[in-house]
Image (cartoon, grey):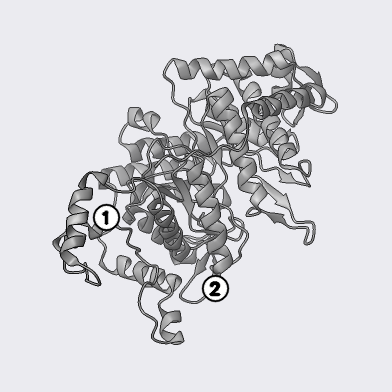
Amino acid sequence: MKISFELLTDAEIRQVHDASLRVLEDTGMRFASRKVLDRLAAIGATVDFAERTARFPPRLVEAAIAGNQELLRKGRRLHLLNGVTSERTGTDTIRAKVSGGCEKYLDWGSRSIRAADAESLLRFIRLGDLLPEVSFVGNPVVAATGPGGSKIDERMRRIETAALIAKNTRKPGSMEVWSEKEIDLLMEIGIIARGSREAFFEAPCLVTAKETISPLFLDENASDILIALAARDLPCTIIPMPLTGMSAPATKPGNVIVGNAEILAVITAVRAFHPHALVGGGAISGALDMKTGVASFSAPEAILQDIALAEVHGRLYGFDFLVGSGYTDAKLPNPQLVAEKTMKYLLTYLSGRASYPVGLINSGAVFSDVQCLVDIEICRYIHGHFGSFGDFSSIGEITDLVREVGIQGSYVAADHTLRHFRESWMPSIMDRTSFSSLTDSQAGDIYANAFASIQEMHSRAEFWQIDPSAARAIDQVVRQAERIL
């Protein structure tokens, strides 16, 4: 089966690029960091230090793009590490992400929203490690309290969370970075988790992207962290979150142009410090709902804007790009949430991306393990619609079978059915049973089945843990972090 899905023409992609260059040349971008402004001035940007803005001659931006392209030609790999977005995977296999950095989670058993704690974090990490479709286990929640309810010092939350991830999954993903001081500590935990420094740099983990503040602003902390990541050859990614009609113009092209200008400005700034840095981008855009004044991440505009920007980066620049597929508007698991997830995942898949953030609800503020299983079922359902239609080389066998079964016969007992029925897509938690009563049907809906499946998995699983010597090494990094942070 061949699928072709493109939003923009080549001419429109070029228009986005040219308009982004004009924005950076005429309006520029504000940087809170003086050292970034100094460096940009040194390479030829027009800097207004009083306004903290830099205007970029197009040649500077084009040179930064060309520098990235040259590194890719030399065999460097662009690592885009973020737990709420989707990147190209080079495969049609589902590669789900259990991540998100949420402060709260949904306790399905009590139907309540709770503050993240170490016990819930461990439970979600283990679930991600058990699920075969999950390839990336980051920080679904960031623990605020440790075992027994003791409060974790705010300066230690990322380190404590990363340590728990590294000890309890073979699939470590991303981790929030809020301070430059955290980077080396998180990197050390990642090296232990991967088994060696070489393996870590081949597949970095436990760091993540930073965000601009739309429109056209990068704060000092984000600047410092991006430059520090680049200095260490760690994944260096910038993700704008422009809102159509609020922090970006009230059209989809306007949103894409502002988002692209922000990404290109940051690529240029980071590479001004570290020309060896391979800097990438992504987008988690939304739209302002003019009736409510609330940001929507599941409006059709949101995913289409991100995919359009991905086409600019993929088809014009030759870069992979993160699409914001993880956030939805629905507050709780319900039909709205299923509809939003299905459409975002479908368009993500059609854009060439088979990596999906799962389990996030309420605009990414809350993590839900039952939603995690429902999301994976949605992904499986979408993938079931594509791929090979079947083997046409055995048409003769089929016509012989039809003759054998005859008119008004049944194929249930045929050997052909026994050989082939497993080729059909089979749900894991969707309900295909016959209707008996409304009560029974409600008791076995997709969310009830997901909750029961989770309970069963946790009751019978043998959970993986890292080697005891590696666990001790991670504990030593945590103690070091307590002294440093």
- In this rendering, the answer to whether 292 lies above or below 354 is below
What residue is rendered at 28% in x and 58% in y? 463
Q: What residue type is labelled 1?
A: Glu
Residue 62 point in image, percent of width and height: 65, 16
Q: Is residue 219 visible?
A: no
Figure label count = 2
Could you give the CA–CA distance between mark 2 and mark 1, rounded to whole angstroms?
40 Å
Q: Name the residue under label 2.
A: 112
- Quick one: 123 or 184, which is closer to the camera? 123
- In this rendering, the answer to whether 204 lies above or below 120 is above
Q: Name the residue under label 1.
A: 423
Q: Can residue 336 be seen in this view?
A: yes
- Quick one: 33 or 59, which is closer to the camera? 59
Sort mark 1 into few (<14), some (14-19) or many (20+) by Cα contacts within 10 Å: few
Position of the N terminus, as image quadrant, is top left
Q: Quadrant of residue 265?
A: top right
Q: What residue type is labelled 2?
A: Ser
Q: In this view, does 215 lie to the left or right of 70?
A: right
Residue 407 point in image, percent of width and height: 24, 69
Position of the C terminus, as image quadrant, is top right
Q: Is residue 51 left or right of residue 204?
A: right
Label 1 element class:
helix
